[in-house]
């Protein structure tokens, strides 16, 4: 029974090797995307264009402004003269944030009264706005705590007034709250899914389109021999992808890997089985490579968004949360992040591993059943 | 092999295939004895490919049954697959693999025994005329070679029954001729071959010819049987000009059963040639068509098919 499987495998590897661009297509996009994600996919906000209207012109107001300048989070692009100028800065996109310090700011501070700082922020990009607002809160809190001996109550936009409670953040597993540490493991899973699903789907559909599939169907080959022959190479390529991208993340971006490589290997194997299963399933629904491409495009985006890669699943509507249950990426992201950053093992990750195993089994079974040796 | 002398190589009874509302093959009965070369002739969309695909187990029949090499197509599809070779017009070889790699792949898929394989591969290569080009990528080969290699791959496991679905379409005439020589060499080894084609001249190379039209078997017999008995009326050849104008005029003449353009002249089937043939020249002349006196000729297969297909169309439009 291994004879047919081995000639299938030999043929697949031969074709992969013959394809001069294959190695290029396999590796270069991965590296490029890794670099792009590693450097660009960040929620950190730096150098926010800021306009300032200082109507107080006091030592205290200048001190507050210098606190903003000192962080490098905010770049003062305009020291405005009046409110009109501030408004036009925001409307014309010259500034994202405008700080208005009203006259009497320092007097209020000295008298121990509330000294309001007005913050105008461009909410078009709500994410940036929210994060910038957070920084403004931190900076003003820092500023007010420095007004030693004096009672301070600084009100900033919608940020709650500083109270007597002091927050001491103590993040575990990623003390610096380095977003790269969060993103890079996610990128490994996402890129691998993308590549393995599309490669598998295209490889099968290409044979259907060229007509060689018909030639294989009239032979006594068994469906599982064909399917194994078709998927094992891409399964192995997937492993290569994960190894390559992981190594890149660890060596280049210095993401810590403190877990067990064995747990990672087990998770990767199950995840890749689910991925080739998905690719096969996709191929059984496509007659041409164009159809496969469209289907691929249509499916992978939701899988990506509904994976927890960037957007927390717990915040999604219930119906979409249920959908994420059939998303192999969802489970693998949990596994890969946990192995990389937390170093936990099977005792913690077994639900994810089990879910992946189930998904892989279901998808592979359906595609073997759907791959009857007939053209109907 | 369990097929004895009495069992036909291919037997189809009431074979039917529907795609939605469209009936591609309509209660087809077919019996092919061992060692025969049967030509499957018919217009495009007549159901030739669909029939062959059902016989190979590539399509499930909607109704009816078929057996190939003594095995039931519906119940024992894998046994059927072991005993057939199949080649379609698409030359289903891997273009990015060499001649030798393709042969090795198909040999492996059919589990040709190692000790037989070397000899059979050599045979396939020499049959395709590819000695010395074993390491050439298949996509670099010209049509004729590709097609002979595809045939070589299809018979590596020495199947007793061979299905060839328009194997010569798109191949130059010289290569087509060579291909038919190969087919007859295989038939000499008692291989049964069902070959579909839309080249009428190729029908003449077959032991028997089956004409299929709109999913129905219209006629079956040796080429000479079909030529001799199938034509109703008498066939005349008519040199005239312009041909198109003449065709229009003849459509309105009651004694003309059928008229068709054959190259630079017309073939006309008349109910009673003795009486009606001489009038034609004057009838055509009245409509400004120059014509010579019609000449009685023996019908070719093509004449027979043109008439049979046309007759089928008439019956259909009447009902």
Image (cartoon, coloured by chain):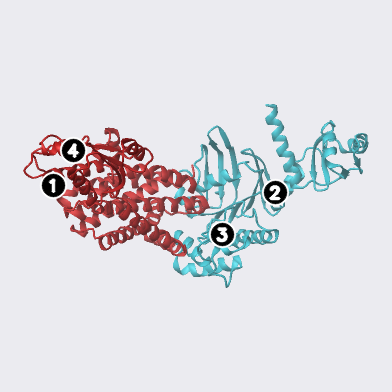
Q: Position of residue A193 (x, y in %)?
A: 34, 51
Q: Quadrant of residue A228?
A: bottom left
- The chain identifier of the residue carrying mark 3 reads B
Q: Real-space Cα distance between discs 1 and 3? A: 71 Å
| Label 4 crowd (10 A; few <14 / some 14-19 / many >=20) | many
Q: Nearer the viewer, residue A260 or B68?
A: A260
Chain B tint in image: cyan
Depth check: B172 or A28 in front? A28
Q: Which mark is residue B150?
A: 3
Q: Crowding near pointer 3: few (<14 within 10 Å), some, many (20+)?
A: many
| Mark closer to the observer (4, 1) | 4
According to the picture, the residue beneath numbered tag 2 turns out to be B222
Residue shown at 20% from the left, 48% from the top: A67
Categorize mark 1 by other alpha carbons within 10 Å: few (<14), some (14-19), many (20+). few
Q: Are marks 1 and 3 on the same chain?
A: no
In the picture, the disc for residue A105 is 4
């Amino acid at each position: 029974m291994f004879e047919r499987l081995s000639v299938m495998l030999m043929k697949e590897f031969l074709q992969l090797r013959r394809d001069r661009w294959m190695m290029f297509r396999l590796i270069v996009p991965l590296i490029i995307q890794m670099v792009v994600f590693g450097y660009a996919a960040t929620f950190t906000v730096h150098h926010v264009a800021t306009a300032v209207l200082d109507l107080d012109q006091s030592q205290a107001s200048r001190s507050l402004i210098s606190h903003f300048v000192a962080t490098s989070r905010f770049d003062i692009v305009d020291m405005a003269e009046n409110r009109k100028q501030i408004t036009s800065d925001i409307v014309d996109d010259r500034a994202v944030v405008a700080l208005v310090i009203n006259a009497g700011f320092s007097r209020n501070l000295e008298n121990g009264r509330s000294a309001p700082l007005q913050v105008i922020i461009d909410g078009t990009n709500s994410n940036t706005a929210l994060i910038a607002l957070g920084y403004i809160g931190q900076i003003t809190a820092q500023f007010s705590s420095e007004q030693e001996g004096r009672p301070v109550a600084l009100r900033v936009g919608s940020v709650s007034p500083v109270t007597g409670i002091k927050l001491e953040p103590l993040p575990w597993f990623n003390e610096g709250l380095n977003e790269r540490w969060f993103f890079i493991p996610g990128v490994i899973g996402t890129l691998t899914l993308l590549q393995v699903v599309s490669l598998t789907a295209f490889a099968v559909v290409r044979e259907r389109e060229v007509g060689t599939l018909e030639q294989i169907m009239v032979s006594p080959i068994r469906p599982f021999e064909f399917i194994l022959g078709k998927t094992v190479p891409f399964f192995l390529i997937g492993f290569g992808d994960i190894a390559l991208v992981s190594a890149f993340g660890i060596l280049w971006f210095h993401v810590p890997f403190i877990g067990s490589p064995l747990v990672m290997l087990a998770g990767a194997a199950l995840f890749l089985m689910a991925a080739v299963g998905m690719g096969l399933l996709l191929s059984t629904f496509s007659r041409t490579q164009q159809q496969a491409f469209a289907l691929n495009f249509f499916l992978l985006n939701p899988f990506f968004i509904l994976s927890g890669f960037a957007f927390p699943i717990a915040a999604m509507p219930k119906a979409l949360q249920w959908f994420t249950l059939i998303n192999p990426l969802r489970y693998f992201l949990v596994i890969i992040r946990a192995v990389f950053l937390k170093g936990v093992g099977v005792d913690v990750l077994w639900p994810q591993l089990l879910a992946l195993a189930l998904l892989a089994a279901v998808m592979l079974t359906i595609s073997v059943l759907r791959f009857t040796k007939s053209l109907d | 092999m369990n097929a004895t002398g009495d069992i036909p190589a291919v037997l189809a009874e009431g074979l039917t295939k529907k795609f939605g509302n469209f009936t591609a093959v309509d209660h087809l009965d077919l019996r092919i004895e061992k060692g025969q070369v049967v030509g499957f002739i018919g217009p495009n969309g007549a159901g030739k490919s669909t029939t062959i695909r059902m016989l190979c187990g590539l399509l499930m029949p909607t109704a009816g049954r078929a057996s190939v090499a003594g095995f039931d197509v519906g119940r024992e599809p894998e046994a059927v697959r072991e005993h057939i070779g199949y080649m379609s017009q698409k030359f289903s070889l891997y273009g990015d693999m060499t001649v030798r790699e393709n042969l090795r792949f198909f040999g492996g898929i059919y589990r040709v025994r190692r000790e037989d394989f070397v000899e059979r591969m050599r045979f396939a290569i020499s049959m395709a005329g590819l000695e010395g080009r074993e390491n050439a990528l298949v996509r670099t080969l010209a049509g004729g070679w590709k097609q002979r290699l595809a045939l070589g791959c299809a018979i590596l496991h020495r199947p007793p029954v061979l299905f060839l679905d328009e194997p010569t379409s798109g191949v130059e005439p010289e290569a087509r001729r060579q291909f038919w020589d190969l087919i007859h060499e295989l038939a000499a080894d008692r291989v049964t071959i069902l070959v579909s084609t839309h080249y009428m001249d190729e029908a003449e190379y077959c032991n028997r010819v089956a004409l299929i039209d709109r999913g129905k078997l219209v006629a079956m017999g040796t080429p000479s049987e079909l030529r001799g008995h199938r034509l109703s009326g008498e066939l005349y050849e008519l040199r005239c000009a312009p041909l198109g104008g003449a065709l229009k005029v003849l459509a309105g003449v009651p004694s003309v059963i059928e008229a068709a353009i054959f190259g630079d002249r017309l073939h006309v089937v008349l109910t009673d040639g003795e009486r009606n043939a001489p009038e034609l020249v004057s009838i055509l002349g009245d409509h400004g068509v120059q014509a010579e006196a019609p000449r009685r000729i023996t019908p070719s297969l093509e004449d027979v098919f043109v008439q049979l297909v046309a007759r089928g169309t008439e019956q259909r439009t009447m009902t």
